[in-house]
Amino acid sequence: MHALVYRKSVPHYLAGMLASRLAPRRFLPGLAPLALQDIPPPDPASTLGSRGRDWAVCRVRMCGICGSDLNLLRAAESLLLEPYGSFPAVLGHEVLAEIVTPPADSPLAPGQRVVIEPVLHCAVRGLPPCEPCRRGETNVCECFTQGDIAPGVVMGYNATVGGGMAEQCMAHRTMLHPVPDSMPDERAILVDSLASALQPVLDNFPEEHETVLVLGAGIIGQHVVRCLRALGSTARLLVVARRGFQRDLALAGGADQVLMSPTLATLGAAVGARLLKTTLGGGNLEGGCHRVFDCVGSSRSVQQSLLALRAKGRYVMVGTAGTLSKADVSSLWFRQLTMTGTTCYGQGLHRGVLTRTYPLALELLADPGFPGQGLLTHTFPLTSWKDAFACVFDKKTNQSMKVAFDMRQTVHGPQRAATAQEEATA
């Protein structure tokens, strides 16, 4: 079968790091240790022995490209996370598929569509549950490097399990979630990215009187806005965006106001803070918003967040930052701020009840009233992988939001996803 395989290469990694600094909006496939290859289809029995009976073989229908995939190709992820991946690996963890061979004694049937929750926690690894897994917090499992499969937090960065940028993949029974017949593929492929935004919203849900700032209006920022509104938040919701199409989507998703690359003074005015001038430039803010969802995760966005928060405000790092530089963190102690992070998806409080995040994301998208239109902007056949990554790298030119591989496409070249949605709902 055809699969997009990433192989570990220090020279290629360093070359990608240099290229991302010199030309951050260009994808240079010759520098990436990535290739479309013919590999054997997955065989859980030969890979995992008797445990293979708990695994399904799935035919991939669509696979989304995630920001973490881009960070890998840009060599922008944290070096401290190297032990939590294994290569060579088939990339892709945002997977919509159909069952070829279900797990033993499973209610799932061949041909049934599923989304795959990709976290490789204790149950997937054939281990007794660690303390977080016993609590249902599988996203912070303490055994991501143990068990009878290779190290890796999610499929797509795992040498044993592989990923969804292939014709077929394998998945443990706990990873499979049936897709309602009424949900088009083009909507179902948004479940994984929505779940990534839903987890921090569940864990950091604002009170009614609060002002909330969402930094970054890419796909995760868009989902944060929609999750807040879908779960009933009436907080004042501000979004910082860079592109006009991002602004339009944020407003359609429920934002009260969108700021386009604001200055410190403009940001301060929007969050109700006073600008305090400083002698050597920059300035400070007094007052501000109650919480920030930072969906960028850069030195600049961290700095903006710390300045925009009022005393005892809450900062939530949603964007997957590695190293940060030149951020003045004096506001952290001076205003007694709380900083927290988020990873993947596990469970959270929804209407006072502990609820699994992934099924809840699927439930939200199954509601026809949920504003998912326009979020999937481009689809590509797997053979056009170079064009697909180029499209994601240059969001400004292509106005790309969520880009996905569509294994149903037999022609070369991209399709506008809006066309696919229209056909799916016709």
Image (cartoon, helix red, strand yellow):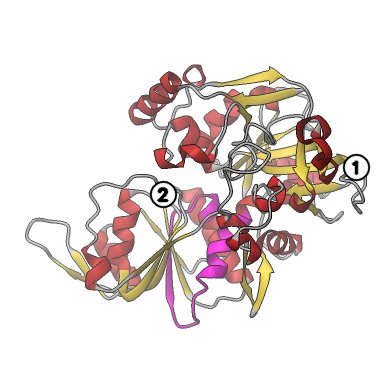
The answer to whether marks 2 and 1 mark residues whose Cβ atoms lie closer than 8 Å is no
Q: Which residues are magenta?
A: 194-220
Q: Is residue 253 visible?
A: no
Asked if residue 387 is positioned above or below residue 115 in the image, the reply reads: above
Q: Is residue 97 visible?
A: yes
Q: Position of residue 9 (x, y in %)?
A: 48, 21
User: Camera-side residue: 121 or 399?
Assistant: 121
Disc 2: which residue:
242
User: Camera-side residue: 194 or 99?
Assistant: 99
Asked whether 154 falls inside the magenta stretch, the response is: no
**In the rendered structure, which amino acid carries the disc numbered 1?**
Gly
The residue at 65%/38% (across/down) is 404
Asked if residue 301 is positioned above or below residue 356 in the image, the reply reads: above
Measure how far apart labels 2 and 1 are at the Cα level: 41 Å
Side of 393 where 357 appears, left or right = right
**In the rendered structure, which amino acid carries the disc numbered 2?**
Arg
Disc 1: which residue:
111
Side of 295 where 325 appears, left or right = left
The residue at 22%/71% (across/down) is 334
Q: Are there few (<14), some (14-19), or many (20+) residues within 10 Å of tag 1? A: some
Q: How many marks?
A: 2
Question: Where, quadrant-wise, is the N terminus in this rendering?
Answer: top right
The residue at 80%/42% (across/down) is 51
Q: Position of residue 209 (x, y in %)?
A: 45, 83
User: Camera-side residue: 316 or 266?
Assistant: 316
